[in-house]
Amino acid sequence: MVSAVRDRGAASAIALALVLATVLLGVAVVAGAGHARSRIEAQHGADAAALAGAYAARAAAAQGHDGHRAGCQSAREAAALVGVRVSLCAVQGSVVSVAVTWGRDAQIAVAVAGPAHAVPSGRGR
């Protein structure tokens, strides 16, 4: 009979511990999902900027204009439309490389775009 008195409330303490553990796990999952979303958004922005820049660089070069200027300007404009900021832009022929930042935690993403024939030998194959 004495042991029954000592165990009183033990189930409540265990239940509280399980609820607390579940809440902490939920918070960790939500935080991880937010970080993954930031990374994905940054990468989508980088891809869009690089593609727009490569298209503009190739079109400008075909018309005898400065492909670097047109490519980077177009990359910055496309990046702004999707909510990222271009921090680095490089143009080599019709190939545009960009680095962008996105979000409060300043996620960084990099993308390269250009015509398939412009990919250096051994890369991208």
Image (cartoon, rainbow, N blue to C red):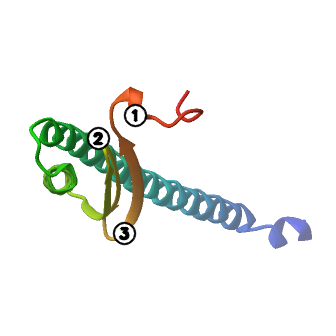
Would you say 67 lies left or right of 107 here? left
Front position in the image: 25 or 125 = 125
What's the residue type where badge 1 is placed? Ala
Dot 3 alpha-carbon crowd within 10 angstroms: few under 14, some 14 to 19, many 20 or more = some
Q: Quadrant of the C terminus?
A: top right
Dot 2 or dot 1: first in sequence order is: 2
Q: In which quarter of the image is the N terminus?
A: bottom right
Q: Where is residue 37 in the image (x, y as percent from the top left)?
A: 39, 51
What's the residue type where badge 2 is placed? Ser
Dot 1 alpha-carbon crowd within 10 angstroms: few under 14, some 14 to 19, many 20 or more = few
Instruction: Measure the C-alpha gap from mark 1 to mark 3.
Output: 31 Å
- From this view, report whether residue 106 is shown above or below residue 63: below
- Residue underneath mark 1: 118
Q: Which mark is residue 106?
A: 3
Q: Which of marks 1 and 3 is in front?
A: 1
Label 2–label 1 contact, CB within 8 A: yes
Dot 2 alpha-carbon crowd within 10 angstroms: few under 14, some 14 to 19, many 20 or more = many
Label 1–label 3 contact, CB within 8 A: no
Q: Residue at x 50, y 61 (%)?
A: 27
